[in-house]
Image (cartoon, grey):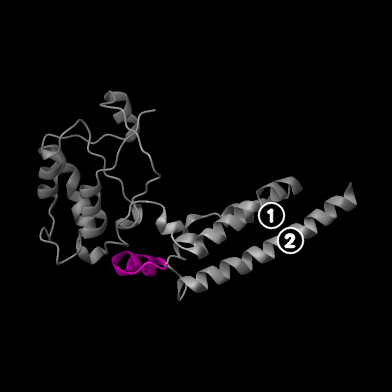
């Protein structure tokens, strides 16, 4: 399987540092960024980030829209071209074998799963919703299955993070809850309601059999 690896530094330059006035490269211009791209080794430079980086993480007042509007031309003038992931896989051979001994992400400083599974609340919430799988699927109720699937959305567990520092600030920025403990309590209340609905569905299933 061909794997495209994220360029951490350049992706985070656009995703996190772009509007930081304390960043030595601020303000970042399309021309400067295109130069950095051209200086990279290898066939492809992979820039992976959330769409919300354009206009939410980096607000309109930061100049992010003007930057992205001018970037394609700056990249072309630097002698580079844009390709999609599918095109990159077709155009270039794999350069080496990649082995990962642990699960990774691009979240937080650890770049692991601790953003979602770093504390007991998160671990318990994930474990409890996963334990319902066989029972949920057995009753064959589309509404219950849909609710159960939505409860596995990673944001629920992200909001339960109790990290501090810069990572904690990012978690706090996105959460709709006053605290990670509130996020946990609300989630467990919804889970309890789902379990009640599941028991009712199981009883109905028994009556119908």
Residue at left offset 30%, top offset 46%: 48
Is residue 48 found left or right of 152 in the rendered image? left
What secondary structure is marked by label 1?
A: helix
Farthest residue in the bottom direction?
A: 178
**Percent position of residue 154, x then y:** 48, 55
**Percent position of residue 195, x then y:** 70, 61
Q: Is residue 64 magenta?
A: no
Res. 183 mark: none
Is residue 78 found left or right of 173 in the rendered image? left
Q: Nearer the viewer, residue 99 or 185?
A: 99
Q: Residues within 10 Å of mark 2 (few under 14, many from 20)?
A: few
Q: Nearer the viewer, residue 153 or 112?
A: 112
Query: For mark 2, what is the residue?
Result: 197
Q: Which residues are magenta?
A: 162-174
Where 178 sits versus 48, above or below? below
**Percent position of residue 107, x then y:** 35, 54
Tags 2 and 1 in contact by the CB under 8 Å rule? yes
Residue at left offset 26%, top offset 40%: 46
Q: CA distance from mark 2 to mark 1?
A: 8 Å
Query: For mark 1, what is the residue?
Result: 144
**Looking at the magenta stretch, what is its main secondary structure?**
helix
Q: Nearer the viewer, residue 52 or 183?
A: 183
The quarter of the image holding the N terminus is top left
Where 76 sits versus 97, above or below? below
Q: Earlier in the sequence, mark 2 or mark 1?
A: 1
């Amino acid at each position: 399987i061909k794997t495209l690896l994220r360029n951490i530094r350049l992706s985070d330059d656009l995703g996190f540092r772009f509007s930081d006035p304390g960043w030595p490269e601020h303000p970042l211009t399309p021309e400067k960024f295109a130069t950095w791209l051209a200086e990279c080794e290898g066939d492809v430079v992979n820039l992976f980030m959330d769409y919300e980086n354009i206009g939410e993480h980096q607000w309109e007042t930061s100049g992010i829209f003007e930057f992205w509007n001018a970037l394609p031309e700056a990249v072309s003038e630097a002698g580079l071209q844009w390709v999609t992931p599918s095109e990159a896989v077709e155009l270039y051979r794999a350069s080496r074998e990649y082995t990962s001994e642990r699960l990774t992400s691009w979240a937080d400083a650890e770049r692991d799963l601790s953003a979602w599974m770093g504390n007991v609340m998160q671990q318990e919430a994930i474990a409890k919703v996963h334990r319902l799988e066989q029972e949920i699927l057995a009753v064959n109720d589309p509404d219950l299955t849909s609710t159960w699937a939505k409860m596995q959305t990673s944001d629920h567990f992200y909001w339960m993070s109790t990290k501090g520092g810069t990572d904690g600030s990012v978690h706090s920025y996105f959460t709709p809850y006053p605290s990670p403990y509130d996020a946990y309590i609300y989630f467990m209340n919804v889970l309890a309601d789902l379990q009640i609905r599941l028991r009712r569905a199981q009883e109905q299933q028994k009556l119908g059999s």
